[in-house]
């Protein structure tokens, strides 16, 4: 950031570089309908700096009627998020995804599945971390994050301290953090960075990172990786 670059947005938010897409191809009419009708009722509450400039904490107890809170960071098309909501109706899950086309896809899946234990934040997960109470998240998922394959772009990956430290702050002691990726160098960076943020790796043998979790659903991103000959890795960490 140069000296001329502002340190805050006009809204008062800290200046956080965001790398990635907010919107892709033109939305289908039904996707526009989902966004117009379903997104606001599924909001976890005031997250953005424009609506919560004092960064007051969300009431997660009221949000899900006291159910334990889980979090998925970058849910893509929403397959895994909806699957987990259906599998664990006694949990409350917040999904974060800045790519609005993916958000619209998720909303359609929520309608079809009829799940009621989900909330959706259509933006940067770091803004959500600001307003979640410390230690409130019992489980978090990072599935096939953007790999940013060029070495000079590795600092843009989620598995950097800029993202991991705030995540660790909102996760409870003993909570579980799952990471799935098919990129070997992303595995390396994950194994270096995540423990530095206060997590311990739970693997005891090769099967613990070669085989998926028992409640895993293979997403379209994973299917693409398998078609292209890449090997998925499934890493499980515990918050110390």
Image (cartoon, helix red, strand yellow):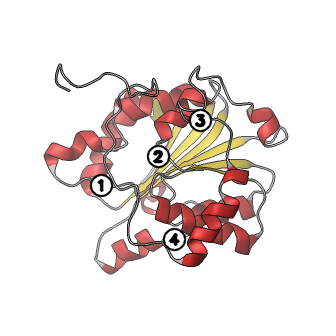
Please give the name of the residue rendered at 47% of the width and 33% of the height, measured from the top-left corner.
200
Crowding near the residue tagged with mark 1, few <14, some 14–19, many ≥20 C-alpha atoms within 10 Å: some
Q: Which of marks 1 and 2 is nearer the N terminus?
A: 1
What distance separates the C-alpha of mark 1 from that of mark 3?
26 Å
Q: Position of residue 105 (x, y in %)?
A: 56, 69
Residue designated by label 4? 218
Give the residue pinned by disc 1: 147
**Mark toward the start of the polypeptide (1 vs 3):** 3
**The quarter of the displayed image where residue 8 is located:** top left
Direction from residue 9 to residue 113 in the image, left or right: right
- Mark 3 Cα shell of 10 Å, populated few (<14), some (14-19), many (≥20): many
Nearer the observer, 123 or 222: 123
CA–CA distance in space, label 4 to label 1: 18 Å
Q: Which of marks 3 and 4 is in front?
A: 3
Q: Name the residue under label 3.
A: 47
Q: In which quarter of the image is residue 67?
A: top right
Q: Nearer the viewer, mark 1 or mark 2?
A: 1
List x then y, in percent, for residue 126. Answer: 47, 35
The residue to which callout 2 is attached is 203
Left or right? Give the position of 185 relative to 162: left
């Amino acid at each position: 950031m140069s000296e001329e670059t502002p340190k805050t947005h006009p809204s008062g938010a800290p200046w956080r570089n965001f790398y990635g897409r907010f919107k892709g191809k033109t939305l289908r009419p039904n996707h526009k309908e989902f966004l117009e009708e379903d997104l606001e009722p599924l909001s976890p509450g005031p997250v953005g700096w424009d609506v919560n400039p004092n960064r007051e904490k969300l009431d997660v107890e009221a949000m899900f009627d006291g159910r334990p809170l889980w979090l998925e960071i970058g849910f893509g098309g929403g397959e895994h998020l909806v699957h987990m909501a259906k599998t664990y109706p006694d949990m409350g899950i917040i999904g974060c995804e800045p790519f609005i086309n993916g958000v619209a896809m998720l909303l359609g899946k929520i309608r079809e599945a009829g799940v009621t234990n989900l909330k959706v934040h259509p933006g940067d997960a770091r803004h959500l971390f600001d307003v979640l109470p410390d230690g409130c998240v019992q489980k978090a998922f990072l599935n096939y994050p953007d790999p940013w394959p060029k070495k000079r772009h590795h600092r843009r990956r989620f598995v950097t301290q800029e993202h991991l430290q705030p995540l660790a702050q909102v996760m409870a002691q003993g909570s579980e953090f799952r990471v799935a990726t098919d990129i070997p160098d992303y595995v390396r960076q994950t194994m270096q960075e995540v423990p530095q943020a206060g997590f311990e790796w739970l693997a005891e043998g090769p099967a613990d990172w070669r085989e998926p979790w028992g409640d895993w659903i293979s997403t379209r991103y994973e299917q693409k990786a398998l078609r292209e000959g890449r090997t998925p890795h499934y890493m499980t960490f515990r918050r110390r």
